[in-house]
Amino acid sequence: MISLFGIILKILLALVISFLGVVLGLFYKGVDRKIAARMQARVGPPIRQPFIDFFKLMIKENIVPQNAVPWIFNGAPIMALVSAITILLYLPIGNIPPLLSGYGDIVLIIYLLTLPAIGMVVGGFASGSPYASVGAQREMVMMMSYELPLVTTVIALGWKLSLIYPELNIFSLAVINTHPIWGLVGPLGFIGVIFLFITLAAVTPGELSKVPFDAPEAETELAGGILVEYSGRNLALFGLTDAVKTIVMTSLTVALFFPYNISHLLALSGVFALIVDVLFFLLKMFLVMFVEVTFIRVAVARLKIDQVSFAYWVPVSIIGLLGLMLIVLDTIII
């Protein structure tokens, strides 16, 4: 049984992780916008711009449309932000284990990832705007499209680990993070893991509603779509949710595919090892964000919603299933 001190300590650590997750998310969001602008030969906004936008929105008037359902309209951004922050508590940071963990927490994370999208859908429908309704319908279609490749990736990794470590809680992210998949497979399985990484890399911009998978917002078509009626504090909360989800998706990719540390290579120990591994973890997150978000949205134009659905249901799902099949074949041959 956890003591009262243990409960208070976990609450304090949860508050610290939440604060750092929000700050880091806004910082990475600023870096992403700056790099994307430079790649497009633009100056771009300063890296601190997401912080400026957040504080500016927080002091602006929070307008609720006349046709909206107020308690749903105002509650949706809070639900989205809380569910995104909750996922942070299940993610390891470098060699620091997650604050919360247990059997099947990776499955819980997948469910929690759907809640911010559901919050946006509910808020969009509750706003009473036709633009927001169209955006909400697109968000639902996209959410149903990328779930299959996302789940395929997690199941493939969990299935392989269950064969090698049957005594462990293989669907725990902490277990996956401490047993890198690359060293557990043969040549065929190695190729399969690469396919699974490509699958998750394709799912990430969809989860974050970034180009080319930003059809639900599509500013040039729907004037902001699903968020068109939001302003002030509510819009600020959705902005924070987007920043936190960026941290969540990049951390999840690092934990599943690149959970390596470098402190032991430098013969470090104690606090220095902790600091170096955390900094290395932040560097990996930045590189993953650049590949999965920044580079893709600069290099590819926005897809129409039917193209988004086709992309996830056919090529991305096939790549994910192919990765799963290669891991199975690799296991059978070995």
Image (cartoon, helix red, strand yellow):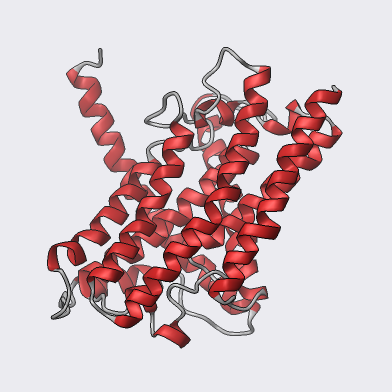
Identify which residue, 194 or 13, lies in the foreground. Answer: 194
**Residue that appears at 67% across and 74% down:** 299
Q: Please name whichever residue, 185 or 8, is drawn nearer the observer in this view of the structure.
A: 185
Q: From the viewer's perspective, is 95 left or right of 115? A: right
Instruction: Name the quadrant containing residue 35.
Output: bottom right
Judging depth in this view, the residue of 197 and 225 nearest the camera is 225
Q: Residue shown at 60%/30% (left/top)?
A: 158
Q: In this view, does 34 lie above or below 143?
A: below
Residue 179 position within the rendered picture, expressed as x and y whole percent measured from the top left:
63, 26
Residue in front for this viewpoint, 216 or 232? 216
Q: Where is residue 69 in the image (x, y as percent from the top left)?
A: 15, 69
* Residue 138 location, quadrant: bottom left
x and y, in percent, of residue 277 in the image: 56, 36
In this rendering, the answer to whether 279 lies above or below 312 is: above
Residue 207 makes an appearance in the image: yes
Residue at point 73% right, 42% down?
323
Please tell me how many numbered marks the rendered image carries.
0
The reply, left or right, for residue 189 in relation to residue 265 is right
Q: Position of residue 119 (x, y in %)?
A: 31, 59
Residue 110 located left or right of residue 179: left
Instruction: Name the quadrant of the C terminus.
Output: top right
Which quadrant is home to the N terminus? Answer: top left
Q: Can residue 262 be seen here?
A: no
